[in-house]
Image (cartoon, rainbow, N blue to C red):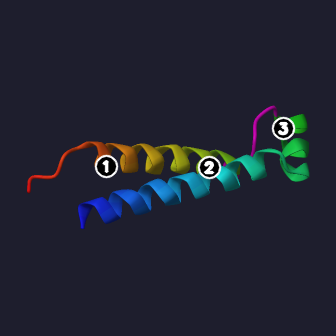
Amino acid sequence: MTRAISLALLVGGVVLLYFGGQSFHSLSNDVARFFTGSPTNKTIWLIAGGIFATLAGLIGLAIPSKR
């Protein structure tokens, strides 16, 4: 069960990173970066959540089970 959750976190993290990258290169984000100098909050949350979920999934898969 723990491996399934870790794998789901890993896959979900990769998906979030993909959508964060797509959002980072969008026209609306380019306009926001032009005026504010930073990407939109949505982009930041997608990338940060993707990094966190991917790391949690990798750590969960790396820790040996107690069976």
The local secondary structure at tag 3 comes to helix
Magenta-colored segment: predominant secondary structure: loop
Question: Mark 2: which amino acid?
Answer: Leu
Question: Mark 1: which amino acid?
Answer: Leu
Query: Which residue extends farthest top?
Result: 37
Mark nearest the camera among 2 and 1 is 1
Q: Nearer the viewer, residue 16 or 41?
A: 16
Q: Which residues are magenta?
A: 37-42
Q: Nearer the viewer, residue 31 or 49?
A: 49
Disc 2, disc 1: CB below 8 Å? no
Give the CA separation, mark 3 to mark 1.
37 Å
Circle 3 is placed at which residue position? 33
Q: Residues within 10 Å of mark 1 (few under 14, many from 20)?
A: some
The residue positioned 77% from the left and 45% from the top of the image is 24
Circle 2 is placed at which residue position? 17
Q: How many marks?
A: 3
Q: Nearer the viewer, residue 64 or 14?
A: 64
The local secondary structure at tag 1 comes to helix
State the image quarter where residue 2 is shown: bottom left
The residue positioned 52% from the left and 53% from the top of the image is 13
The residue positioned 81% from the left and 31% from the top of the image is 37
Query: Which residue extends farthest left?
Result: 67
Which quadrant does the N terminus fall into? bottom left
Q: Where residue 18 is drawn, which disc sits there? A: none
Disc 3, disc 1: CB below 8 Å? no
In magenta segment, residue 6? no
Circle 1 is placed at which residue position? 61
